[in-house]
Image (cartoon, helix red, strand yellow):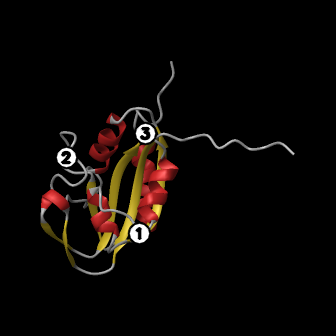
Amino acid sequence: MRKISRRLVRGTYCLMAMLPRKTRISVGALGLVELPPGIYVYIGTALGGVEQRVRRHKSMKKKMKWHVDYLLARAEIISIMGIPADRKEVECEVARSLMSCEDVSIPVMGFGSSDCGCKSHLLYFGDVDPEWVAEELSLRLSMLESVYPRSR
């Protein structure tokens, strides 16, 4: 029997989470923030491996390191979409593209974007159907040149 090798997938990911109720959380240097209930999408990069990063995000016992760790202490991950990429800039391109979705808002300025010039890498979609959000994410990502390069 041939052994299956597990190749490290580097890239960007979109993590969809449901916050069940209005919540106040302290988010590191961002301080105390109030978040309404609903669907949130966090855009991150894991050039060391998306699978390992997502496994860490799902873990209940972890040191609070990234802004999203504070949110995930109260929210439930409902979907994750990985995007193979070898550049950190893809994360910002994805975040900017998703900011143009209908009725999306930025709940916390600077969330997840302290190392770039983006307004935020956390987006709030409100109290909507998660399937609609997943479809919208897929549509937006399919149109990004950095995600699906066009050949000549």
Up-down: is 30 above or below 117?
below
The residue sitting at 48% across, 39% down in the picture is: 10
Label 3 to label 2: alpha-carbon separation: 17 Å
Q: Is residue 108 visible?
A: no
Label 3, residues with CA under 10 Å away: few <14, some 14-19, many ≥20: some
Instruction: Give the label, 1 or 3, closer to the camera.
Output: 1
> Residue 23 vs residue 17: left or right?
left
Determine the residue located farthest toward the bottom in the rendered image: 21
Indicate the position of residue 1 as horizontal and vertical percent values. Answer: 87, 45
The residue under label 3 is: 47
The residue under label 1 is: 61
Q: Which label was assigned to residue 114?
A: 2
Label 2, residues with CA under 10 Å away: few <14, some 14-19, many ≥20: some
Indicate the amino acid at tag 2. Answer: Ser
Closer to the chain start, of discs 1 and 3, is 3
Indicate the amino acid at tag 3. Answer: Leu
Snapshot quadrant of residue 89? top left
The residue sitting at 22% across, 79% down in the picture is: 22
Q: Secondary structure at mark 2?
A: loop
The residue sitting at 38% across, 44% down in the picture is: 45
Closer to the chain start, of discs 2 and 1, is 1
Q: Secondary structure at mark 1?
A: loop
